[in-house]
Image: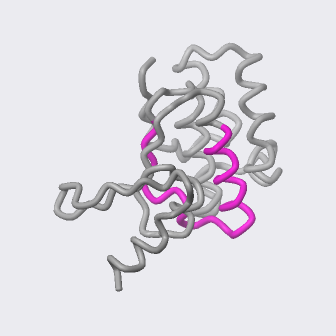
């Protein structure tokens, strides 16, 4: 599968059932499902799986984490995340940055992040594209972490 789009959470399932469902439709075997959960345990913080809560009863941040994990489940080569840091506490934001960086290193996937949070973007993205009205107006190389000054000048 070249890319994966999982844009919904089924409210009447538990997070465990939902991840099992996503694994099944993505042809992930039980061992792969187990590895997915183990690799993301720090990100999930032990607060989502095994709790017997329905998805509809989770906080916005917990739903965000579950959706991100589901999108990554099939290890797509193109992962598009819209405002992935929204609703996450600082510890979860840092865990997500580590998870995405590790995912990119291990899979070589392209990860497109749409975000208004420049600090998180600068910390994990080697390239930053500024867009206005659907057009790229600046393409900034951030391999050396040097984009901050250019972004500050642009938004000043």
Relative to 148, 41 lies left or right: right
Residue 86 position in % (x across, y down):
53, 65
Question: Residue 156's spot in the image, x, y percent?
Answer: 35, 86
Coloration of the structure image: one colour
- Quadrant assignment for the N terminus: top left
Q: Is residue 52 magenta?
A: no
Residue at figure coordinates x 16%, y 62% from the top left: 133
Q: Nearer the viewer, residue 150 or 104?
A: 150
Position of 19 relative to 32 (above/below): below
Which residue: 79% across, 54% down?
47
* Nearest to the observer: residue 57 or residue 110: 110
Q: Residue at x 37, y 79 (%)?
A: 153
Q: Is residue 128 left or right of residue 107?
A: left
**Picture coordinates of residue 54, whole percent (x, y):** 65, 49
Image position of 117 (left or right of 102):
left
- What residue span does the magenta drawing correspond to? 79-102
């Amino acid at each position: 599968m070249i890319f994966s789009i999982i844009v919904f959470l089924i409210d009447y399932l538990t997070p465990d059932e939902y991840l099992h469902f996503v694994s099944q439709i993505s042809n992930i075997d039980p061992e792969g499902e187990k590895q997915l959960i183990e690799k993301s345990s720090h990100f999930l913080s032990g607060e989502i799986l095994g709790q017997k809560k329905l998805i509809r009863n989770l906080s916005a941040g917990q739903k965000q984490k579950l959706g991100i994990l589901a999108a990554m489940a099939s290890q797509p080569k193109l992962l598009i995340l819209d405002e992935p840091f929204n609703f996450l506490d600082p510890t979860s934001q840092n865990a997500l940055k580590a998870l995405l960086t590790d995912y990119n290193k291990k899979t070589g996937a392209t990860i497109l992040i749409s975000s208004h949070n420049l600090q998180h973007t600068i910390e994990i993205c080697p390239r930053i594209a500024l867009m206005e009205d659907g057009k790229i107006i600046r393409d900034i190389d951030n391999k050396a972490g040097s984009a901050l000054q250019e972004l500050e000048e642009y938004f000043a």
